[in-house]
Amino acid sequence: MSINKIIKAIDRYDSFLITSHIGLEGDALGSELALAYLLKKKGKNAVIVNEDGVPQNYMFLEDKRFIKPLYAKIKKPEAVFILDCSDMSRCGKVSGIMPQDAPLVSIDHHISNMCFGDINWVEAKSSSTGEMIYKLYKKMNIPFERKAAICLYTAILTDTGSFRYSATSSYTHQAAAELLKFNIAPDDIYKKVYECNSYSDIIMFKKALDTLTIDDTGKIAWLKMDMDLPDSQSCFDQTDNVMDFARRIKDIRACFLLRRAKNKNEVRVNLRSKGNVDVSKVARFFGGGGHRNASGCTVKGSFAEVESLVFKQVKKAIK
Ligand SMILES: [Mn+2]
């Protein structure tokens, strides 16, 4: 089992760099911090570096002892943990600060994971990377401290869409049940993560909903956000919230959202589907990745071009 390889790597090395993907969110950040707490308990050094800063709605997890800015001076790590990333490019600029000779240890639950690490632990059936880190604590017999429990609960909560997605298993609920014993108020965490939008965020939401379109079969819905989005610090990186409205339409099998990418001649595409419609294939077709029911990619072209290109592939995926 590759979880044992992870434990061996923790035993073997003394200092670790921990990172995750661009577009930092609950699962990525919560897993990073919980792993850092675990490493500290084992007497190891850990530092977390991400391309993005901590988003506003996850500030309650922020721990400056571990999270350092991208170009901060850090001690050269002996090994690098890459969490929740299906491939190296998802790490963004952080790959530039990884020592050449440091082994890469990948922990991830994306089915599209390329096993790019020197050591890989990939569990496509896990609801979240947070659930895998929880498993690591259990396997290593490390007691949870309350901070770690909050991080892991948040990771699991957000990556399961509040325990609604198909990867939510009885093990997921067992993990959440145990974590809740650490005097965690689920309503409080939910509020912090999801009920923190500004008025202008909601106006943007409204504009996005105005673009909601469905095809003539009634099976595909899509939305466009062709506007300047607030930077990653904003709480409005809640793609799922916008797409939820498309998903709620009866008989919809797949939906997608087009957003402005960082690069002007590219469009960021998020895809969601129900049941056995596999949108990770669509994402992979365009060089992206993800899960069967939730994936993403970045596509070159104008909004109109990308719209028709992606629509064609989604239609294929439904057949
Ligand atoms: Mn995840």
Image: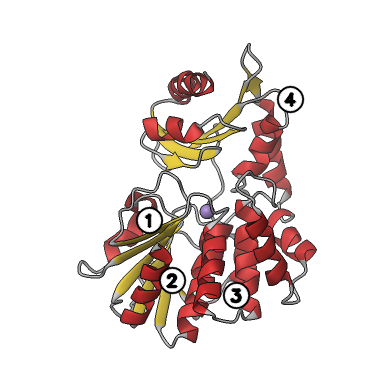
Task: Decide which of tag 3 and tag 4 comes sooner along the chain.
Answer: 3
Callouts 4 and 1 close, C-beta under 8 Å: no
Residue 24 appears in the rendering = yes
- Disc nearest the viewer among 4 and 2: 4
Q: Which disc is residue 91 wearing? A: 1
- Disc nearest the viewer among 2 and 3: 3
Task: Decide which of tag 4 and tag 2 comes sooner along the chain.
Answer: 2
Task: Decide which of tag 2 and tag 3 comes sooner along the chain.
Answer: 2
Q: Residue at x 66, y 17 (%)?
A: 218
Q: Is residue 4 left or right of residue 165?
A: left
**Which amino acid type corresponds to the residue marked 2 in the rendered image?**
Ile
The residue indicated by pointer 3 is 148
Q: Is residue 98 left or right of residue 158?
A: left
**Whole-number angstrom distance, CA of label 3 to CA of label 4:** 39 Å
Indicate the quadrant where residue 267 lies.
top left
Which secondary structure lies at badge 1? helix
**Whole-number angstrom distance, CA of label 2 to CA of label 3:** 15 Å
Residue 13 appears in the rendering = no
- Disc nearest the viewer among 4 and 1: 4
Q: Which disc is residue 250 wearing? A: 4
Q: Residue at x 53, y 74 (%)?
A: 137
Indicate the quadrant where residue 138 lies.
bottom right
Q: Residues within 10 Å of mark 1 (few under 14, many from 20)?
A: many
Callouts 3 and 1 close, C-beta under 8 Å: no
- Disc nearest the viewer among 3 and 1: 3
Q: Which disc is residue 48 wearing? A: 2
Callouts 4 and 2 close, C-beta under 8 Å: no
Residue 89: x and y in percent read: 34, 50
